[in-house]
Amino acid sequence: MKITIDYKNVLKFITEKEIAQNKQATLDAKKILLNKEGLGNDFLGWIEYPLNYDQEEFANIKKAAAQIRTESDVLVVIGIGGSYLGAKAVIEALKPYFPKKDDLEVIFVGNNLSSSYMQEVLDYLKDKDFSINVISKSGTTTEPAIAFRLLRNLLIKKYGSLANKRIYATTDKAKGALRTLANEEHYTTFVVPDDIGGRYSWFTAVGLLPICASGIDIDSLMEGAKEAYLECVNCEYEKNTALLYASIRNLLYKKKRLIEVLVNYEPKLLYVSEWWKQLYGESEGKDHQGLFPASLVYSTDLHSMGQYIQDGMRIMFETVLNIEKPQYDLVLEEEKNNLDGLNFLAGVNLDSVCKKAMQGTILAHVDGDVPNIILNIEKLDGFNIGYLLYFFMFACGISGYMLKVNPFNQPGVEDYKKNMFALLGKPGYEELLKTLLKRL
């Protein structure tokens, strides 16, 4: 497989025999997933999606992205949760840290309710040519709906009757408030598939339009996802990284390792971790069970959270993302005075220093009774990111079924929304408002 797993640093905590004994439970969960026999089976369109995605819509995504890049300095992506995290993860992972002067800027709004952030976005866009990609299946989710209302008004003030040509709506194919508005105003539209939930939707138009507009090759992403599908489905248990990852984290959970910390040594993967946290937290956190997903960027966080990881409560394990080949080969040079004492590293490339820091950290944490899984990824490019994200989704579906929960719904998310609607005075929530006010 293109991603390999090194689990020797968990064998102090679980045995090869236990991993072998967990094989049947893992394969049973895989069978339920692929045969679409389990809970949430009406949201499994993502499984074969890399093989059968709509080629016409894919071409239209490229066409729209080219148009956005031609006429805009900024693309404003409006969405929350799965409607933005996948695109944000891919863009952050694959674009340079410091963009080129004339490159399209992609910014994300509608994922918080900060008035300060929203006002600064509006002020920033006043002197920019910009387009909007609003992503919402219903069009009524509070955070993106508020952002869209404010940004649409600015767009109309700036461009008048031409504003609608700069709005791209990714929404339900037939119903909902945003679909109705898009039809009335003749926006360019793309479809949120009925059978793919938000956190599994990064390789649909939900993620691909902003990703493509940013200048990233979406063909390579889909090729990576396709390769991951073929290998996740066809490789036998002992050689299947996705199955082994799901199995090992399940065994560690049973041994009261309740927190999984996704670790990387490349800051570009920060939002891959944020996407991963939603994927696993929203998929597994049901019926008062499931691993709590957390993430850290090393070596930065070794100087803030390292003490707790090393010596705190032993309720966690780490999964380390290791990028094997760096994008750049930066070599340290010798200095005459050697005031910093680093001449022993002369001629050594910086990635080698990073790898030694990773190896030393893993050994220290294992000595401190923290199990460590290493996921090796060849390099940071479109193919491998597409592969990685699909790999995580496949393993997540299996993990959820091993817990006997529905990995494809999120009923708990609705509780805060009901309370928020009541407290805001939304019609239909009057009785709940009375109850909440008594509690407040």
Image (spheres, rainbow, N blue to C red):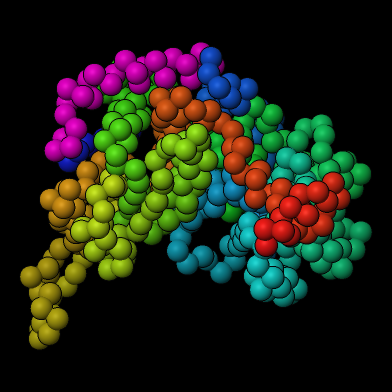
Residue at left offset 14%, top offset 81% = 340
Q: Horizontally, is 316 left or right of 192 in the view?
A: left
Question: Which quadrant holds residue 202?
Answer: top right
Residue 435 percent location from the top left of the image: 74, 52
Residue at left offset 29%, top offset 47% = 316
Residue 18 on the magenta span: yes
- Location of the C terminus by quadrant is bottom right
Q: Nearer the viewer, residue 264 or 310?
A: 310
Residue 434 percent location from the top left of the image: 78, 54
Question: Which quadrant holds residue 330?
Answer: bottom left
Residue 295 on the magenta span: no
Q: Horizontally, is 407 left or right of 227 in the view?
A: right
Bounds of the magenta segment: 11-36
Residue at left offset 29%, top offset 19% = 23
Q: Is residue 274 above or below residue 150?
A: above
Q: Residue placed farthest to the front in the image?
A: 438
Q: Horizontally, is 417 left or right of 424 in the view?
A: left
Residue at left offset 30%, top offset 60% = 298
Q: Nearer the viewer, residue 207 or 439?
A: 439
Q: Nearer the viewer, residue 53 or 180?
A: 180
Q: Horizontally, is 148 left or right of 294 in the view?
A: right
Chief secondary structure of the magenta portion: helix
Residue 283 percent location from the top left of the image: 51, 36
Residue 423 percent location from the top left of the image: 75, 58
Q: Is residue 237 above or below residue 308?
A: above
Q: Nearer the viewer, residue 270 or 340?
A: 270
Q: How many marks?
A: 0
Q: Is residue 82 above or below residue 435?
A: above
Asked if residue 329 can be seen in this view, the reply is no
Q: Residue placed farthest to the left in the image?
A: 344
Asked if residue 25 can be seen in this view, the reply is yes
- Location of the N terminus by quadrant is top left
